Image (cartoon, rainbow, N blue to C red):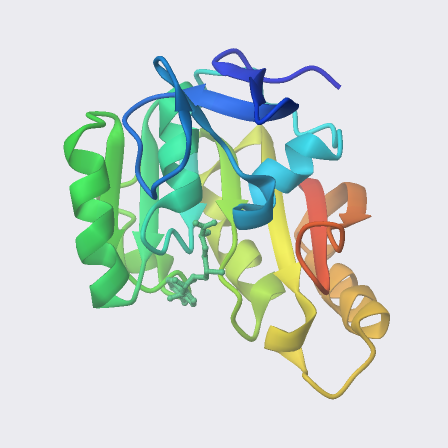
Amino acid sequence: MSLPDGVERRSFDDRQRLATRGDPVYGEPTDGPWRLWDAGRSKLGAMLELGLDTGLSGGESVLYLGAASGTTVSHVADFAGPTYAVEFAPRPTRDLVDVAAARPTLFPLLKDARRPETYAHVVESGLDVLVQDVATRGQARVAARNRTFLDPDGRLLAAIKARSEDVTRDPSAVFEDVLDDLRGSYEVLETARLDRYHDDHLAVVARPRE
Ligand code: SAM
């Protein structure tokens, strides 16, 4: 699957790895203007490494839920258009604000992704992409509530963490339940286990139901 414009494979330590162009954020290796996008530290990076059909081509408008300190969303802002980054923990959001200082199209929001009505006045609707990596219970519900921001032809790119739903159950069973819930508001287009990079995580590509 092709990579979005602004994402390339470049040689780091004699291996071809993903890279974007932008200011370094987390001590990642650089090659001129390019900085390594480490799939081991980024579920979206892992989705691209594994060749999922994310639909990303570069320049998209993005709502990113679970931005943490900005590791992944900084790469997204390097190749995407306006990128709204929601995180509810104050400490990582402080780092995220620093990351955004060098990226004029990245907008950090200290908000709870379970309550989209609290940022609906800031985030535009008709967005191209909703990226979700919240690692919290009720991941399907979070995606359902934020569907309102997506264009009908938009894409949900979600990383579902089994242990956030139930530490005691078999991850495959958890994923089936989450997918069942997701299907109430999305058509699931593709799924893939991310275990090569992230234990007990499922990647989901979906589009909003009419
Ligand atoms: N996506 C990040 C990255 O790749 O750089 C890592 C995200 S980390 C796995 C999950 C993040 O989601 C945490 O920072 C956590 O505070 C945040 N989170 C969990 N529940 C949330 C919620 N309801 N609203 C906003 N952020 C939430």
188 with respect to 103 (left or right):
right
The image shows residue 91 at horizontal and vertical percentages of 22, 65
Frontmost residue, 64 versus 199: 199
Depicted 149 relative to depicted 13: above or below? below
Viewer can see residue 210: no
Disc count in the image?
0
Residue 200 lies in what quarter of the image?
A: bottom right
Frontmost residue, 14 versus 63: 14
31 with respect to 118 (left or right):
right
The image shows residue 171 at horizontal and vertical percentages of 79, 72
Residue visible at 36% across and 28% down in the picture: 77
42 with respect to 74 (left or right):
right
4 with respect to 25 (left or right):
right
Frontmost residue, 159 versus 31: 31
The C terminus sits in image quarter: top right
Depicted 169 relative to depicted 126: above or below? below
Residue visible at 29% across and 48% down in the picture: 120
The image shows residue 140 at horizontal and vertical percentages of 62, 62
Q: Quadrant of ligand 1?
A: bottom left
The image shows residue 94 at horizontal and vertical percentages of 17, 56
Residue 102 lies in what quarter of the image?
A: top left
In the image as oriented, which residue stretches furthest toward the bottom? 168
Residue visible at 77% across and 44% down in the picture: 188
The N terminus sits in image quarter: top right
Frontmost residue, 57 versus 199: 199
Residue visible at 74% across and 88% down in the picture: 168
Viewer can see residue 162: yes
Residue 202 lies in what quarter of the image?
A: bottom right
